[in-house]
Image: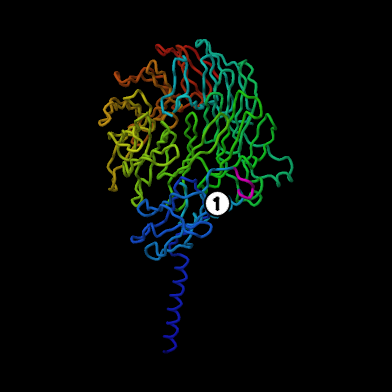
Amino acid sequence: MNKSRWILTLIACGAVSVLMVASFFFWPKVNTTVAQTVLAGQPLTLYFTAPIKRGVEASEFYITDHSQEKVPATLSYGNERTSLKVEVLQPGEYKLHMPNNSFKGWKRTTNDTFSFTVIEAVKPVTSIKEIEKFFKQAERQNTLFTSRGDVVLESASEDKASAQGNSGHSQTNQQVEGVDEADQVKTDGDFIYDITNYEELIITDIRNPKKLINVSTIDFKGAFYPRELYVDENLLVVIGGKQQEQPSTADEAKRMMPMQELSVIQVYDVTDRMQPKLLRETGAEGYIIGTRKIGQHVYMVTNNRPMYWIQEASEGEGLLPRVFDSTTDDSVQPMKIDQVSILPGTMEPSYSVITALDIHSGEKNGVQTKAYIGSGEQLYMSKDRVYLTSTLYGKTGAEGNSEVFKFGLDGTNVHFLQAAQLKGTILNQFSMDEHDGYFRVVTTEGNLWDEKNIAKNHLFILDKEMKQVGSIEDLAKKERIYSARFMGDKAYMVTFRETDPLFVMDVADPKNPKVLGELKIPGFSNYLHPLDEGHLIGFGYETVSKKNPQGGEPIIQTRGMKISLFDVTDFANPKEQATEVIGGQGTYSPVQHDHHALFLHPEQNLYGFPITVYQETEEEGILRSEKAGAMLYEISADKGIILKADLTAGFPNEYMDWEKEVQRLLYSGDAVYTIAANEVKSYSLEDFILLGEVEK
């Protein structure tokens, strides 16, 4: 061999070696994560980034216990062989063993065993070391998620319209009867309590609608930012955020951890509306997921994400959420270890903190706070249950699935019950419901524009143990859920991409739910509200379909706000009985994203909402704001949709005055009130003539 050929051979061999080394590092991998936990009785699901190849049976996987002895278990594939479900295991520590050559091509596993633990119940941690270990593992897992695909181990009331009754005044539109929801504005029939400017709380006397009087103002002076409130006779509950006090010296600042906002519950005595008195403050670090009030108990759920990647915060009390209560000590203190638990299956490096306060109690034992490691995003609450949801993120086969955590309520005592994992993501609280002990939920799996993971929608029904007993899967492919509503034995779901399919589903038999009917119409509904057992009201947008000049799918554009009256008396043939389209493109109302903005007067079939109306000019693409204020409609099964009052006005100089923009409507007795940031107006409920107004 001559010298030049010998050199070429060496170069070729070197190139092959480099290719082999590069392949070793860059070939697709399926890796194990850190050890996980699952509750006894719940399935453990192992997710893969690629499907197990044909010929490898689920029975070839096996489980060993801490003694390395094989244990019996039920194993089955799911999601087109991209997941493996493991069932029937007693509490203990286990390893799942993967067979060799499980994947096609050169895919390989870094480890062939996956450790996990089955626990009898969720219990408080016994030392700070458990928390430190969790967050270090979570940090390692998040690093894996950002660099490559992995295997992830995860654990797998009746909904009615707001109860208005015959109280004679507005109540906040709520999802579940008996479970009050907070809002920016409340009334007890005699006074309006208002935080629409987010800086002050103003109490307005409305006993004489022709002579409105601001009787008192609580100026928070920038130390507290109110966001929502509740009224309980002579008690007023204000919920918001405040910044923690900064350290006074450089040495203190060096020792202190980075601080999050405090989410705070304030309780006022308003027996004398002219002189509200602060009785109590309590709170926890983190941002608010949601609040509810049941009787004399207020519940606040917050999310706290400690800065565990900072060295000073990576150990000890720096990892604990901090809380405070004015009946004990105004200082903010780390929670006690026995108040912290780790949710099964979670690897989300954050806390869900649940604060339960008895507002009638001035004692320190009137509040209980518990922290659960694992994030919460959406909140659904019945009279004795709390459901928190969390979306799984990361480049895994489980990405885009949801975890649901179920808690029991008994006054201020909140305790974890069960957990489950579901395919797809959960839109909002109206995608969930509890009825006769069963939890029902609708989800969207996949993405609208991803042909490899097309969007599809599911309904799941779980029993008291959070085990799935029934489902309807793969509805409305290439569409996603825009709104949902559960009403007793029926479930309604709106999906959208080009048209608005309204699905009517029978969920009377939890083990055998069925699609009864489907209606396709232009536009979509963001919010569904029950009118009666056979009718629904939808609030959303009208849409038009235009030809795509580039070819391909048509372009869908929104137009004016749309109100739809759906007749579902014939479940197999739902109909859009009546419609109303307001304004043109750009028209919007807060009711389309916040159901609390819906005005309800059931006795008169009145439904109202704040609105800003836009119209298109002759010049294509140019929008002109026309007017803003509020509108009220009479909506009934026999009359359809009738405009009763247009309480809007044009803008001076074509610019909207945000301080006069109506944010809420209320009624008390024979008057309707519109509330803006700097004014309250009253109108006759009979003919909607202006009666009085007062600036704030």
Mark 1 secondary-structure assignment = helix
Q: In the image, residue 590 lies at what x, y percent?
A: 44, 29
Residue 509 position by quadrant: top left
Residue 3 position by quadrant: bottom left
Quick check: is 128 in the magenta stretch?
yes
Residue drawn 43% across the image and 47% down it: 400
Q: Which residues are magenta?
A: 124-130
Quick check: is 84 in the magenta stretch?
no
Q: In the image, residue 687 lies at what x, y percent?
A: 39, 12
Please say whether residue 142 is visible from this viewpoint.
Answer: no
Seen as rendered, the residue at the extreme bottom is: 2
Q: Which residue is the site of mark 1?
A: 138
In the foreground, 565 or 2: 565
In the foreground, 630 or 659: 630
In the foreground, 603 or 554: 603
Left or right: 264, with 59 as reference point? right
Left or right: 257, with 117 as reference point? right
Please say whether residue 193 is visible from this viewpoint.
Answer: yes
Q: Quadrant of the N terminus?
A: bottom left
Q: In the image, residue 29 lies at what x, y percent?
A: 45, 61
Residue drawn 44% across the image and 47% down it: 43
In the foreground, 288 or 559: 288
Q: In the image, residue 184 lies at what x, y percent?
A: 52, 26
Disc tally is: 1
- Say if 430 sits above or below 42 in the image: above
Q: Amino acid at mark 1?
A: Ala
Q: Residues within 10 Å of mark 1 (few under 14, many from 20)?
A: many
Q: Quadrant of the C terminus?
A: top right
